[in-house]
Amino acid sequence: MRFIVSTIGTSTLTNSINRENQDEAKNWGRILGMSANLKEDELSEESEQVMETLAERAQEKLNQNDVETNRRASAELNGIYGIYGGSLPRNSNDQHYLICTDTAQGQRTGKLIKDFLTNNGFSTVHIVTPDKLSTKDTNAFADGTKELIKWLEEFVPKPPSNYEVIFNLVGGFKSLQGYMNTFGAFYADEVIYIFESSTDLIRIPRLPIQIDTTIIERYPTEFTMMAAGEMYPIEQLEGVPETLLELVADNGNTVAGLSAWGTLIWNRTKTDLLKNELLHFPRLEYANSFIKDYNDTNDPDARVKLQETLAKVSYLLKKHRGATSGLRTDGGLQYNRYTNVKGKIDHFRVNGNRRVSCQVGKNGLILRHYGAHDYVNNNP
């Protein structure tokens, strides 16, 4: 089976402009360009009408059920047809994920491609829209690529698996293609392009990449905290390459968090660093019972998830100056107080079955127990 990730651009719309009509080609192209990064509720009536007309034209082309017409109509479909040797299979179990920008044009184009694939027998087709992903400005694009990495890390099958992971980068914006080409070196078995304007595939196989973790090993707590959202004065991250950091001016000082590349490298290395010793995070104290519970946990993935959750709790406590209000409003932590035990004992969620019990201390939280839901609840 294949797990196919396709970057979605706007070619399905722009290829439906009547180029023989010079006024339409000029004016509609201009309108699409001006509205490229707008969301649906930000569109002018003119932009909406142009987009709707082009979408209808594209749909008419795709309804003709002609392979050559379809490949000319959409760069993304041209790549997908190439993956299947020019003929789409029927009733395929392959999974298709369409990476669309967080814009009206991205959503409209993604829906056209999704509907076409669904109508042609693919049972699993999803539109993926990383929050803020657009080419509006560098900040929005950087935030969007970080969200994209989170999705890739969570959903793309990791070896060994029964899936062949393919990144179809024939369509999409050039800026996003550049990032996805690098991401493909970590997540995809194969990255494909189309040679010029032909139907011939260019296939780039997975390359062996070895990551130097030396500098990350010097700052395991800081990297875990930055992955949770923390920013550090740049002076505290001496030796960390700037390519791994996102630098931000803050009242005349420079602070840093993880860049898209830093997030990618961290995701590839964090397991080896977080599955061993229990790290110490700001505003968290560990009771001996908590340390014992951690040491008794043999599952590396459970240890990693716990330490990531502790970093998140620490970050929120720092942000709110030790108050637990930020923990209570975070839906993922489900922070609450026990009502059936003596003393003021709280708890928060690590994942579906694991909890941490704790008490409010002078500067943050004192962690008491960690483990399965019933174990912690029965022994808070």
Image (tube, rainbow, N blue to C red):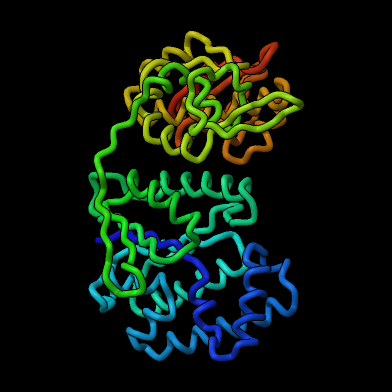
Outermost residue toward the top in this view: 288
Question: Residue at coordinates 65% horizontally, 74% vertically from top-left?
Answer: 30
How many discs appear? 0
Q: Please state which of residues 371 and 7 is positioned toward the viewer in this rendering.
A: 7
Does residue 197 show up? yes
Decide if residue 247 is on the left or right side of residue 94: right
Quadrant of the snapshot with the N terminus:
bottom left
Q: Is residue 149 left or right of residue 32?
A: left
Residue 313, image x and y in percent? 59, 27
Of residue 37 and residue 28, the one placed in the foreground of this image is: 28
Residue at 52% x, 44% y is: 146
Q: Residue at x 63, y 45 (%)?
A: 139
The quarter in which the C terminus is drawn is top right
Q: Measuring 38% from the left and 73% from the top, which residue is drawn there? A: 77
List x then y, in percent, for residue 90: 27, 78
Determine whether 349 is above or below 68 in the image. above
Q: Position of residue 163 (x, y in %)?
A: 26, 55
Q: Is residue 339 above or below residue 69?
A: above
- Taking 239 as reference, is 44 above or below it? below
* Residue 90 visible within the image: no
346 or 87, which is in the foreground?
Answer: 87
Q: Residue furthest front?
A: 22
